[in-house]
Amino acid sequence: MHTAAPRLTMGAVTVTLAPITMTHAEGPLADGTAGQVWGAMHTTPTAVPGGLTGRAPAGRGPLALALLPEYGGRSDFHTGRFSLRFRLLNPLLPRTCLVGTDAPVDFALKRSGPSRRISTDPPVIEFSAYDDVFTAPAAKDCGPLTGPLNRRLGLPAPAGNLLSYDASYTFRTYDRLSLR
């Protein structure tokens, strides 16, 4: 299980996302290859400064805008590859409004430095990574606000994006799991 509070610049928006917790299992398969099993991802929406218009006051008003990261179908923390979709939340937007509708935003994280062991029992390890070359597609399925919303967010964004991923994780080896 690991927890991160990523900093995201995607198009014209820069935010520190609400903490994300991911659970997954990984290790060697019977044939010796590496394998992973996805568990779950939990997070909450993050307010986008300036809301829908870029000048809206912070808060929950009708012009507020929030990003909700969602699992995009890939997580491989051995290679640093994972993917997310970003649901855009506002009372004026349909629930279908997403960045990454057709294909998720794919990240290829590179380590910023060595991992650091914080504790041995339980094991807690911190690491930092980043991706500064990912592309971000336009938002889709946002109703009549799709065009203005993409202009406001600077999407699609083929360059100039950055995900800084500072995380900590803990683990249990399979031989330490209880058999209930």
Image (tube, rainbow, N blue to C red):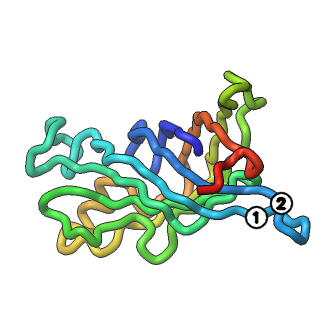
Residue at x 83% of width, y 60% of height: 28
Q: Position of residue 124 (x, y in %)?
A: 66, 30
Where in the figure is residue 58, as x and y percent of width and height? 18, 36
Tell me residue 70's x, y (percent).
43, 59
Type of the residue with mark 1 = Gly
Residue matched to label 1: 35
Q: CB of mark 1 within 8 Å of CB of mark 2?
A: yes
Residue furthest to the right in view is 32
Is disc 1 surrounded by few (<14), some (14 to 19) or many (20+) residues within 10 Å? few
- The secondary element bearing badge 1 is classed as strand
**Quadrant in the picture for residue 143:** bottom left
Q: Earlier in the sequence, mark 1 or mark 2?
A: 2
Tag 2: amino acid: Pro
Q: Quadrant of the C terminus?
A: bottom right
Question: Which of the labelled discs sits on residue 23, or is there none?
Answer: none
Question: Does residue 166 sit above or below 33 in this rendering?
Answer: above
* Quadrant of the rendering where the N terminus is positioned: top right
Of 47 and 75, which appears nearest the observer? 75
Indicate the quadrant where residue 114 lies. top right
